[in-house]
Image (spheres, rainbow, N blue to C red):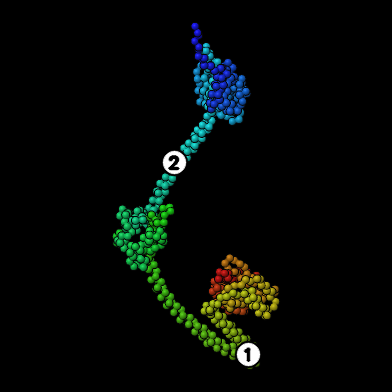
Amino acid sequence: MAKKSRKPSPRQPSLQEDEIFLKSILDNIPDMIFVKSAKDLRFARFNKAGERLLGRKLKELIGKNDYDFFPKKEADFFTRKDRAVLRGKKLVDIPEEPIHTRTRGVRILHTKKIPLFDSSGKARYLLGISEDITERKNAEEALRRSYEKMEMWVHERTAALSRINKALRESEERYRLLLSSLAEGVVVIGADGKIHSVNAGAERILGVKERALLGLSIYDPRWGVLHEDGTPSSPEEFFTVASLQTGKPFTNIVIGLHRGDGELVWLNGSTQPLFHPGEKKPYAIVTSFFDVTSRRQMQAEIEKLNAELEQKVEQRTSELKAAINELEAFSYSVSHDLRAPLRAIEGFSGILLEEHSGSLDDEAKRLLKVVRKNSLHMSQLIDDLLSFSRIARKDFMKKRVPMEDLAGLIVDDLKQGSNSVDVTIARLPDAYGDTALLRQVWVNLLSNAFKFSRKNPSPKIAVGAKDEGNEMVYFVRDNGVGFDMKYIGKLFGVFQRLHSVEEFEGTGVGLAIVQRIIHKHGGRVWAEAKLNEGATFFFSLPKMEQA
């Protein structure tokens, strides 16, 4: 019999092919896969992902254990977990474990370890699968920090908002207290022209309670508004209406209106428009006002008094003009009517002395000389008195006055009669005033200095000036007889003398003239002295820029 032919059986893959196939699978898995010997926990297998993660080649890893690559503390942790897996003979899930790599630093792994048993049920190997979760953990940490920051920001914003709300409540309370304590009236008017809020001052001034004012329109004709001059005003002319329509503030507008009881009251009012950001039309205005009724009444009284005062001034001016005319007539009488008899007395007494001296004894001659001397003194007294009275009426012609030149010329004139006097003139700033009057001041003061220092064997006179703020002070100092300061009050009076005519000639009017001239220039006059040690006379004038 012929044998039946058999079909060839499919070829079984060799162990080498199985190994290549398994390695290909393992190397294409993205997570690190490793196999350790259960006996000594040395690495028996590693896939490509494990090589990349640890930064080591396969030949560096196979046959080595954890202590060959990782810090001891880390290697101890891995070893404890491995032993636990082998003892328990079941899978162990390690959610997070740090691992030091050669090139990528510390990474965080999620590792699962499971024992591999032989046919007898004994654990021969330990299989580990580790997923690199570093980026995920970093993202989670960043998210956690971001969440914490957000929570902190929300907490801070909530706290800030709470503080702002508290501050707003406190500000509103202060605002209410402030408004209620103000004597002025304050009214908030909306864009619709209606009153939205009022304070106690507004209630008092307007004579209307808050509940009646709220919602009242400023266009209401019952206000009966008047212009400042008292003429009627329409509601459209009300300054609050103008402020609402134009968005412009108004200040110090005086109006009249009728209170709730019908009484006319005059107010001084101002407005301040309120705007929402970016808008040009106000959503409301704040109007403040105060009662000026009493002030207007007082103003009317003042105007009445001013009119009466002007009338009285005109009357007094007329009387003063009449008195001045009478004084001028008196001055004319003194200068003409009194001079004639004085000239006659002086003339006749001179004739007697010159033409009839042979028939007169010594006593008669002495008496005639006394008569002539006194008549001359009386004539000088009349001249000085007229000069004193004319100062008040003299036209005041102010201009720049060269004080140093003026004083120098007068000293030169006075030295012609007394060359022995040592006079020094310091720099004297120019003044602003009447040249003729200021010349008279220098003449009187320098003449006195020459006169009262002539008994000193070495007479000295110093003229100077000093700056004292808003005024310039000039002075004349001598080393003459001086005077006792207790008599300073008499020094500048008319006909007041501190020395007898026999000692020093004069009429006692010169210093009074000086004082009147300086006062007319807005200055001051004073003196300092010691008896028998000299005197200093000062006078001040406003500086040129102040005059």
Q: Quadrant of residue 264?
A: bottom left
- Give the crowd class for mark 2: few <14, some 14-19, many >=20 residues within 10 Å: few
Give the percent coordinates (x, y) of residue 35: 56, 20
| Distance from the alpha carbon under mark 2 to that under mark 1 | 121 Å
In front of the other: 37 or 513:
37
In front of the other: 538 or 261:
261
Amino acid residing under circle 1: Leu
Residue found at the very far top of the displayed protein: 1
Element under disc 1: helix
Q: Is residue 384 left or right of residue 175?
A: right
Give the percent coordinates (x, y) of residue 178: 40, 52
Q: Give whichever of discs 2 and 1 has the lower sequence position.
A: 2
Please give the name of the residue rendered at 57% of the width and 69% of the height, measured from the top-left corner: 545
Note whether 499 is above or below 95 in the view shown: below
Give the percent coordinates (x, y) of residue 324: 48, 80
In front of the other: 444 or 400:
400
Number of numbered markers: 2
Q: Is residue 513 left or right of residue 251?
A: right
Note whether 222 is above or below 454 in the view shown: above
Please give the name of the residue rendered at 59% of the width and 84% of the height, measured from the top-left corner: 376
> What label sits on residue 353 in the rendered view?
1
- The answer to whether residue 429 is seen in the rendering is yes
Q: Quadrant of residue 128?
A: top right
